[in-house]
Amino acid sequence: MSSQRKLANRVRAKASTMSSMRFICQGFWQPMKLDQFMGTLDPETTQESAASTFTSAQQEPGETLEHGPPAKAETDSEKLQDGASCSTHPGDGKVSRNSSNKFILLGKLDSARTLTNIQKTIRDIFDILTGEKDMDHLLCEDCTDKFLEQVDIQLIIESENQSYKYWMGRIREEETKTLQEELEDLELEEARLVQELKEVEKNQERIAEDLEAAWAETKMLDQQDEQYWRDYSYLQWQQRELQNELKSMKNQLRHAQIQWGRLKKTSVFSATFEIRHDGPVGIINSFRLGCLPTTPVNWKEINMAWGQTALLLLTLSNKIGLEFQRYQLIPCGNRSYLKSLTDDPIELPLFCIAGQKTCSHVKFDQTVMAFLDCMQQFKEEAEKAKWGLCLPYRIHVESGLMEDSGSSGEFYSIKTHLNTEVQWTKTLKLMLINFKCSLTWVSLRYQE
């Protein structure tokens, strides 16, 4: 109780001091009028208030004298006191922010005077008087109203801020819930995809095995295909070779057929013995048989022509199977001769040597007479065949003449003695014409 008296005395001292003091508004720098309650405080009331304040100060924070929760007005007043930071610069009357955050609100906060407000005012005054709360800034009612407006704005902002935080929390909770649901869905999807991945890996392994088997089969097929194309190329090459050989054989066959056709059409006798004439002179195998005063021919060529004629007669007689009875033909080129088959065989030369006129021409005339006899034998034998030979010029062996059975009906001698070159050449020409007809007849018979 001694401490309470000391506190009461200190409060009375402070109150008496404050009653004589003048307070100036920090907003407009005008003297302020204290609350009537402050002036009517008597020492007992002050003491009681101080005692009650001291007693309430020893109670738990946040409790009133009735041990209940602080009223809303008290809470608002505390917020105003704690959140106040307005101050004024001396002389300009403008309100500014101060880092001290300490204001003493003097004046009415609420028109209704309640016990709580009175106790709050007494506590504030007691704190000021005891020095536990510094009184830095005193405000008048106008400044207080302005300050309260600012505080209301701050409270509104604070309320909106709290609402923002509340709704942000709600949104975050909803987003968290949504994200949690999405996360669960994604985890399920991940599990499903992992299962699918495992199946895909199994399928991939199976496909890899199948692919390896397919590659092995492809390689084997490629080898078979390569071998096939190699065999195909070889067979194609053989086919081309056989085709070329076949074409060659066909060409050879065609050539052989052409040659065979030509040979069938060609008479071997006519091809071997070519008989033609150059005007009045007859020619056999390019050798002229006879001579003219205007066309002299040496005896060497004439002898070769007689040799070809003897060879022709011998070939024709052999073809028809004729054997001469009185003479034998010995063709020896330009030295051909006839051999007599009688008891006294002699050789009759079928050639004449130039410069030996008398003896040579006599033997030569006998030889050509014997040759004409052999030719007559061939004619008679050929006439006996199925297709009898018919010569255009008749032969007279005894006189050695060739008869022109045409329009003239003249006779030409084959002898050289007492004969002219023109007559003798004409006789040889008629003889060659008979041989040409004989060649044609034998060729037709040979083809049959």
Image (spheres, helix red, strand yellow):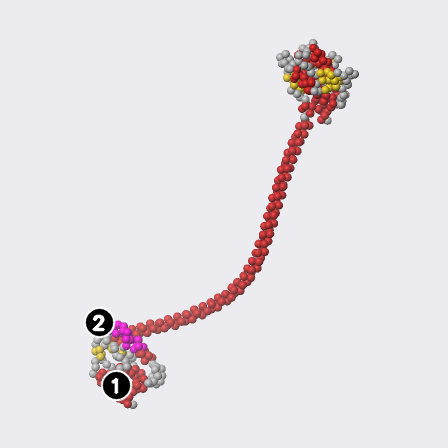
Q: Residue furthest bottom?
A: 1
Residue 70 lies in what quarter of the image? bottom left
Q: Quadrant of the C terminus?
A: top right
The percent coordinates of residue 406 (x first, y second) are: 70, 14
**Which label was assigned to residue 11?**
1
Measured in 3D between alpha carbons, the distance from the residue under mark 2 to the one under mark 1, in whole angstroms, is: 35 Å
Left of 236 or right of it: where is 91? left
The answer to whether residue 376 is seen in the rendering is: no
- For marks 2 and 1 on the same chain, the one whose residue lies earlier in the sequence: 1
The percent coordinates of residue 355 (x first, y second) are: 66, 12
Left of 84 or right of it: where is 239? right
Q: Residue furthest right?
A: 343
Which residue is at a point 35% across and 72% down the rendered structure image?
161
Residue 50 lies in what quarter of the image? bottom left
Q: Secondary structure at mark 1?
A: helix
Q: Is residue 285 above or below residue 148?
A: above
Between 70 and 430, the residue placed more toward the observer is 430
**Which label was assigned to residue 296?**
none
Looking at the picture, which amino acid does disc 1 mark? Val
Q: Looking at the image, how many numbered discs can be counted on the residues?
A: 2
Which residue is at a point 45% across and 70% down the rendered structure image?
177
Say if the magenta span includes residue 288.
no
Residue 306 lies in what quarter of the image? top right
Q: Quadrant of the N terminus?
A: bottom left
**Which label was assigned to residue 92?**
2
Q: Is residue 91 above or below residue 254?
A: below
Q: Secondary structure at mark 2?
A: loop
- Residues drawn in magenta: 79-102
Which residue is at a point 74% across and 21% down the rendered structure image?
317
